[in-house]
Image (cartoon, rainbow, N blue to C red):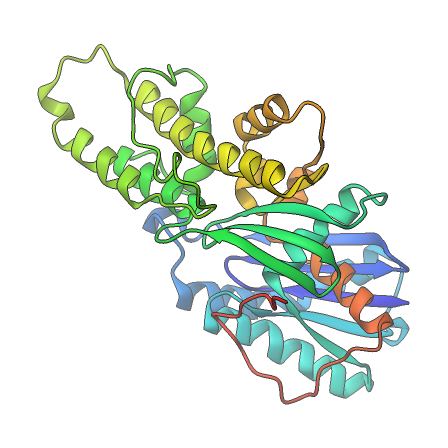
């Protein structure tokens, strides 16, 4: 089966071709226009998608040495994400589906992030625990099989990726926040400042990062009056360490509580090298899977792959499906 995947949930315009479970092309265009604003501007993102989509899809087909009439199905992100950017991708996909008389499947962006780990390790088997960490979500999932998911815990306020973005803004390190803080932290002392670790001692598997963000804000309000023995690099390293401590310790608790031998990490924050090192150190006797870096951030390969799985299972979407900016994963 040959499936085209389309991803426009935020500020990456992406298209990919999956053929019988293998990604044969994956094209991603990251919008740089938002850097000067310190965050994604939804209207600008939608306009960029409209401008780029046709070119990106054509490039993905050309790289796979295929054309539109070779497609057996089209998969597109339905949510969660920005309503305007999602609408752009869905309208494009629906037009192709109707013009080619090809089945279409609406894909959950979060579920696709998790299934990107099957691309990273084709031998991955259920059941497993997933730590899903991105700009908008921080969740722990227990996956027993496809479409059989249990939510173990989630953030009660800010997501980890959001905490990175807001922290970078406070520190004036630029956008996107995660990579900016990670780069600054390379030359800093992670023990210089003891920032709070929200809910880290709680038996709950939920997360909280709003207190950490507020603590950084208060620290920087008074920073100009302090002697500069503590550098911005030290602050970035300490802030990053607080986030990673919470994420890794909650994952360890979930693995222990559910006696699972396999865990996967998904989402944009999974690209953080310090997080990878910390989790591997905490779980030396467990199977830990991180996707390749280009599968951590938003991409269409994961959309095409999951779309093919669902189409092969006999699923498809009616042409009148809508945009769901707050779409959640189904639980059982």
Say which quarter of the image contains residue 211: top left
Q: Residue at (82%, 87%) from the top-left corner? A: 101
Residue at 51 percent across and 69 percent down: it is: 85
Q: Residue furthest top?
A: 229
- Give the quadrant of residue 107: bottom right
**In this image, 299 relative to 155: left or right?**
right
Q: Nearer the viewer, residue 113 or 183?
A: 113
Between 151 and 307, the residue placed more toward the observer is: 151
328 left or right of 223 in image? right
Residue at 47% x, 73% y is: 84
Q: Position of residue 294 (x, y in %)?
A: 66, 43
Asked whether the viewer can see residue 15, the reply is yes
Q: Can you name the residue that lies furthest to the left here? A: 225
Indicate whether 228 appears above or below 266.
Answer: above
Residue 119 location, x and y as percent? 78, 47
Q: Is residue 107 above or below residue 283?
A: below
Q: Quadrant of residue 232?
A: top left
Look at the picture and state if 228 lies above or below 146.
Answer: above
Quarter of the image where the N terminus is located = bottom right
Give x and y (percent) for residue 312.
86, 71
> As drawn, is 30 to the left or to the right of 175?
right
Q: Residue at x 44, y 48 (%)?
A: 206
Q: Position of residue 31 (x, y in %)?
A: 51, 53
Determine if residue 27 is in view: no
Total marks drawn? 0
Quadrant location of the C terminus? Answer: bottom right
């Amino acid at each position: 089966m040959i499936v085209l995947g389309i991803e426009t949930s935020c500020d990456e315009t992406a298209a990919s071709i999956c053929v019988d479970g293998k990604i044969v092309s994956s094209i991603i265009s990251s919008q740089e226009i938002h850097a000067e604003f310190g965050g994604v501007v939804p209207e600008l993102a939608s306009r960029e998608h409209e401008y780029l989509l046709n070119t990106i899809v054509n490039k993905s087909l050309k790289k796979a040495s295929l054309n539109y009439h070779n497609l057996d199905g089209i998969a597109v992100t339905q949510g969660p994400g920005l309503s305007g950017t999602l609408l752009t991708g869905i309208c494009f996909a629906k037009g192709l589906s109707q013009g080619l008389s090809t089945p279409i499947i609406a894909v959950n962006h979060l579920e696709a992030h998790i299934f990107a780990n099957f691309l990273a390790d084709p031998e991955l088997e259920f059941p497993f625990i997933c730590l899903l960490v991105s700009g908008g979500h921080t969740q722990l999932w227990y996956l027993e099989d496809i479409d059989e998911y249990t939510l173990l815990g989630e953030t009660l306020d800010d997501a980890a990726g959001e905490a990175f973005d807001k922290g970078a803004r406070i520190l004036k390190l630029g956008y996107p926040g995660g990579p900016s803080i990670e780069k600054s932290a390379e030359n800093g002392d992670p023990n210089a400042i003891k920032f709070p670790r929200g809910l880290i001692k709680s038996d709950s598997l939920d997360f909280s990062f709003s207190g950490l963000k507020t603590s950084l804000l208060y620290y920087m309000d008074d920073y100009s009056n302090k002697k500069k023995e503590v550098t911005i690099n030290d602050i970035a390293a300490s802030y990053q360490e607080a986030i990673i401590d919470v994420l890794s310790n909650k994952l360890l608790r979930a693995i222990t509580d559910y006696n699972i031998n396999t865990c996967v990490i998904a989402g944009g924050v999974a690209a953080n090298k310090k997080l990878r090192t910390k989790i591997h150190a905490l779980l030396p006797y467990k199977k830990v899977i991180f996707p390749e870096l280009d599968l951590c951030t938003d991409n269409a390969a994961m959309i095409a792959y999951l779309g093919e799985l669902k189409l092969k299972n006999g699923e498809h979407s009616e042409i009148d499906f809508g945009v769901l900016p707050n779409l959640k994963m189904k639980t059982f």
